[in-house]
């Protein structure tokens, strides 16, 4: 009888975790801008990515970084979406990172699923992040916000 209770409890926990993961997939989290890479931050520390970290130059206006894996179902369509978005405005770079080959970056930026997209400002700070199948309208809206923010600074 105890085994049945443990089995039911385990299934309930797994269902709850699965629901949370599904609800968060494709959602975009945005991060506040800091003044400069060396400025103190009161909440969470700012993360900066350089071109040398990625092995590719950052865009003049923004950079879209996608962490992918060979077995990822949504990585190809996500990459195509990012390329389409980048073509809508000058100065936007798209960089794809193989999560399995770049475990240093995967761990550093806490990538737990693919595709994970990091949207970087021109200075390399993370403006937004999305994990799972991205939604085009939300990505476009976030990218526009990053581009507008760059015009104000």
Image (cartoon, rainbow, N blue to C red):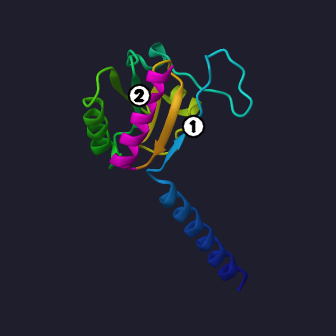
In front of the other: 134 or 109: 134
Where is mark 2, residue-wise? 147
Q: Quadrant of the N terminus?
A: bottom right
* In front: label 2 or label 1: 2
N-term-proximal mark, 2 vs 1: 1
Range of residues picked out in magenta: 133-153
User: Magenta span has 137?
Assistant: yes
Residue 2 seen in render = yes
Where is mark 1, residue-wise? 110
In front of the other: 143 or 46: 143
Residue 57: which quarter of the image?
A: top left
Location of residue 22 with respect to 138 vertically, above or below: below
Q: What element does badge 1 sit on?
A: loop
In the displayed orientation, state which residue is furthest to the front: 152
In front of the other: 11 or 109: 109
Residue 134 seen in render = no
The reply, left or right, for residue 16 in relation to residue 25 is right
User: Magenta span has 48?
Assistant: no
Q: Position of residue 103 (x, y in %)?
A: 51, 30
Q: Position of residue 138 (x, y in %)?
A: 40, 47
Question: Which residue is at 45% across, 20% downward?
Answer: 122
Question: Which residue is at 44% across, 15% downward?
Answer: 51
Q: Position of residue 141 (x, y in %)?
A: 40, 42
Q: What element does badge 2 sit on?
A: helix
In front of the other: 111 or 49: 49
Residue 76: which quarter of the image?
A: top left
Badge 2 crowding class, 10 Å Cα cut-off, few under 14, some 14 to 19, many 20 or more, is some
Question: Which residue is at 44% across, 20% downward?
Answer: 54
Residue 86 numbered tag: none
Main SS of the magenta part reads helix
């Amino acid at each position: 009888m105890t085994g049945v209770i443990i089995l039911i409890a385990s299934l309930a926990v797994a269902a709850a975790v699965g629901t949370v993961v599904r609800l968060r997939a494709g959602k975009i989290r945005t991060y506040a801008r800091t003044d400069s890479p060396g400025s103190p931050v009161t909440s969470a520390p700012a993360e900066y990515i350089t071109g040398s970290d990625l092995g590719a130059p950052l865009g003049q206006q923004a950079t879209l970084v996608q962490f992918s894996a060979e077995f990822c179902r949504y990585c190809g369509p996500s990459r195509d979406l990012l390329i389409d978005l980048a073509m809508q405005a000058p100065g936007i770079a798209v960089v794809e990172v193989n999560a399995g080959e770049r475990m240093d970056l995967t761990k550093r930026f806490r990538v737990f699923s693919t595709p994970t997209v990091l949207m970087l400002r021109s200075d390399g700070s993370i403006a937004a992040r999305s994990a799972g199948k991205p939604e085009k309208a939300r990505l476009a809206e976030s990218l526009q916000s990053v581009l507008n923010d760059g015009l104000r600074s």
